[in-house]
Image (cartoon, rainbow, N blue to C red):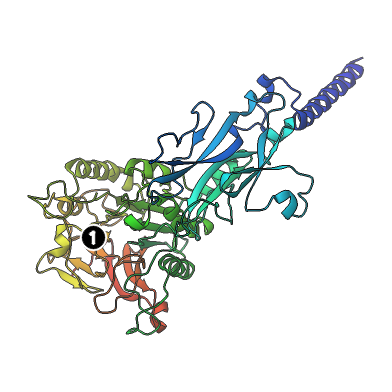
Amino acid sequence: MTRRITRTLTQLAALLTLIALLLFLADSRYKVLPNSIHDRLPSHHVGTVVTDITITYCSSANPFSACRLDNEKWQRVEKDLYLRSGWVQSAWLHVQRRKEEELTVGEKVVVGVRIGRLDPGIAEKGQHDEKWESRPGGIWVLRSSKRHDSDSERAVTAVDVLFGADAADPRPGWKLAQNPLLLEGSKDLQVARLSTRHGRPNPKADEKSRDTQPRVRKDGTFKILQVSDAHLSTGTGVCRDAIGPKNDEPSEHCEADPRTLDFLDSVLDSEAPDLVVLSGDQVEGPSAPDTQSALFKLAAPLIERRISYAAIFGNHDDEGALSLSRASKWASCRTYPTAFPDLDQRTALTIYMLDTHGLTPDEKKYEGYDWLKPSQISWFTSTAQGLRKQHSKYSHFHLDMAFIHIPLPEYAEKGLVVKGGEWREGVTAPKFNSGFYDALADEGVVAVGCGHDHVNDYCGLRPGTAPAASSPNDHGEKKERLGPWMCYAGGSGFGGYAGYGGYHRRVRVWEVDVNAGRIVTWKRVECCGEDVHKRIGELVVVEGGRVVGA
């Protein structure tokens, strides 16, 4: 009797499992389950699906032209497709979206997007049975009313616009159109390109792409690549003060961004850093009206190599016509794959990165550039002191570094010991000294890296007496220290100035050895000859956990 009951229950369970599987498969194709169940299935799109795409043109000279369609039906992508370069005309991409569960019977969703002059149903092989619909700007959309298409990987779920023939979209699941939009107006306009995402976001894939927490290598080393003043543009950009294969020969027909990114590619491959620090002026203000397009180009080689990176902003990073605020740009950058990794508090190295802002708020009294604020210094001090107890649990040397964009006033002090590079131009530090150097020294920061002054690449140290070592047995106690070393990265980008007698673009490498409590730093240059393979200006700045005196 017991066996019969067991066999019956087993058969019933198998039958129910089979029915559930069949319902799941049927719902994935024909949406047969009630919305309350369907919406919770893993195949359901979280968010919305795109039902239509169009472009509107408007003119400030024509009061009857509409720059924005019905807000209840359309969402406008807030980027003028002319990048505000049209005298009176502008163009705007509009996207119609619907929640997947709100689609009515027969309502169409976009499952394909093409850009071109010819109907893809005629021009493309395998598309002859499809009905493509024409939209302004050379856009062709393929829409489907089949019930299962709204939940399929064919459905377009997001649309964006990037600019430039060299644009890149490193976001997982996004595809950038090769052909630019066919816009009315001048041929001199920066090309605008659609980027689309098909299917629902894959949380596991996104999580995997972000799972690149930097770790100390087995040999105890950790390498940081500091890239400063890349000065990328929207589009390829124009080189400034570029040197050709021979040191005394100006470079002709030079496109700035491709050359900058080629240099970055070569250093990433040869140095294989564990972390990249972008220390400001990633974009070249006026020539980067769409900062997103410029930043994506810089992030792409890092994301492709799954290298973690973090960034601070410089004085040029928010000058573009379509630039976001610093807060919005910061929030956006944090969503990029491999960006701003979270670090364990019990680590070998703490890196502090602070915003040095832009132009001075008081030109009459303190001309030039802004300074670090008391609230920032207070945050740094309280954070450093709060972490000291955690650091004491680490069994090896613990070291602290900092990165800023605009140099501190102490970079320009008379009597500064200068090593490992050249002081070619004036130090454009703030005229007001808010005391951040003293805070760094008080909290035991051993080195600070900056950018801003492109052709300076030296490391400087205030003269003093060598301190006691910060050893594993210090138990987090604060001791009097020498330093920190103050180092320039040098300008890396061809969109920014150089000159000064033949300066070559460069980046700075920092190698930390946690076993020896050592930091060694050097530069890599873009050209010329054998120097591209050499460590330039190699300098030991920390040994045995303490700053190396001059």
Q: Is residue 513 visible?
A: no
Q: Position of residue 105 (x, y in %)?
A: 71, 24
Front in this rendered view, residue 469 or 157: 157
At 22% from the left and 62% from the top, the residue drawn is 486
Residue 434 horizontal side relative to residue 472, left or right:
left
**Camera-nearest residue between 354 and 419:** 354
Please tell me in which quadrant of the rendered image residue 279 appears.
Answer: bottom left
In the rendering, at what x and y percent does residue 390 appear? 33, 44
Side (left or right) of 455 relative to 168: left
How packed is label 1: few (under 14 Cα within 10 Å), some, or many (20 or more)? Answer: some
1 is higher (above) or lower (below) than 233? above
Q: Residue drawn at (13%, 49%), measured in percent from left and top?
A: 434
| Res 257 quadrant in image | bottom left
Name the residue rendered at 36%, 50% in the picture. Answer: 394
User: Is disc 1 placed on a helix, strand or loop?
Assistant: loop
Circle 1 residue? 469
Amino acid, disc 1: Ala
On screen, residue 18 versus residue 262, left or right, reads right
Q: Nearer the viewer, residue 210 or 98?
A: 98
Q: Position of residue 424 (x, y in %)?
A: 20, 73
Count up the numbered dots. 1
